[in-house]
Image (cartoon, rainbow, N blue to C red):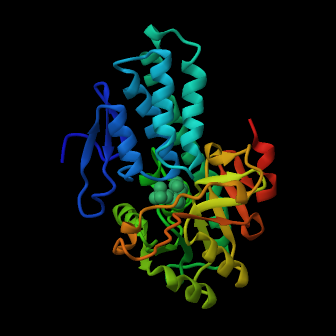
Amino acid sequence: MSRHPLTTIQEDEGTVLILDQTKLPQHAVLVRLNTLEAAAEAIRVMRVRGAPLIGATAAYGVALGLQDDAGDEHLEQVLSVLAETRPTAVNLRWALDRMAALLRPLSEDVRVLAAWQEARAIAELDRKANAAIGVHGLPLLQKAVQGGATWERPLNVMTHCNAGWLATVAHGTALAPIYAAHQERLPLHVWVSETRPRNQGLLTEWELRQGGVPHTLIADNAAGLLLMQGRVDCVIVGADRIAANGDTANKVGTYLKALAAQAHGIPFYVAAPLSTIDFSCCDGASIPIEERSSVELGADAAIPVANPAFDITPASLISAIITEHGVFAPGEVAKLKP
Ligand code: MRU
């Protein structure tokens, strides 16, 4: 390992260092991004992943891309290369829109410096937003613990995919209230679903192990049984895009957990920063769903495969959305429009 601390993304002398998530949990390897192409590839092949981290990496990708040519035409090319990398997480478009709005009116000679500054601001905003999600989500868990949790029978929280610090610049979204609760020494245990086909649950398992948070890894298909048996007190997941009506796109498998949670009267929470809310998108049906390679299913090229990477959880199945501005009913998110 290098002298650099283990964070998902950091600047280093005009380059960007990322923690390569395709190597986790076996190896913690930092990879240096020097170019636009390297940043775009890192997003595409999921060396960096998770909606907020995709957005921050794209912002830094703009800064890297402008270093050799900060002209108008090249700026547009850089923005469009990055916009094409992954379709569902709206944080990507949010970050690129922010970069574009700032950089387009500037003259070439000041663009590079401004791009680095803005990428840094986007990263810092994510860090702060996620810390605030932890603060706002904590009372939901504290209230649930008051229902009688002890270390013999801790509060059981289920999560899906990885919406921890690995998926963000810092703190995580769904895991932020869990880390806050752990810091408050609440008796808490996390059910971590494997998240086929890419096994992001193993990233969550790794994170929680590093943080000393009690947890158990389960196969995705075990979630329904655990919910039915009363072994889950609430579900918290992250989001890749929340429509204006509260419908939420998140990692495929989220919807099934929400259905099962509602069937058994278990609260189902979504945690996400404002950068994940697409106010221009009226409902879940308008959210583009990424279709990924059949290779992820280990299938032979001759086998017909469908591999949607995300699904949509209708607002009606979501108990509340935890943001950096507080906790809202899904139908209320539209009023958060800046
Ligand atoms: O395909 P991924 O691993 O980028 O998908 C990540 C998720 O679905 C996360 O739950 C979501 O981005 C929230 S991350 C804080």
Q: Height in image: 242 above or below 99? A: below
Question: Is residue 95 toward the left or the right of residue 313 in the image?
Answer: left
How many callouts does the rendering have?
0
Q: Quadrant of the C terminus?
A: top right
Spot occupied by residue 271 in the image (x, y as percentages of width and height): 62, 57
Q: Residue at x 51, y 63 (%)?
A: 309
Q: Height in image: 219 above or below 58? A: below
Question: Is residue 24 toward the left or the right of residue 87 in the image?
Answer: left
Q: Residue at x 50, y 31 (%)?
A: 79
Q: Nearer the viewer, residue 124 or 195?
A: 195
Q: Height in image: 137 above or below 91? A: below
Spot occupied by residue 2 in the image (x, y as percentages of width and height): 19, 43
Q: Nearer the viewer, residue 67 or 29?
A: 67
Q: Residue at x 59, y 14 (%)?
A: 105
Spot occupied by residue 97 in the image (x, y as percentages of width and height): 59, 32
Please indicate, yes or no, whether residue 145 appears anywhere in the rendered image.
no
Q: Residue at x 42, y 63 (%)?
A: 293
Q: Nearer the viewer, residue 312 or 160?
A: 312
Q: Height in image: 48 above or below 72? A: below
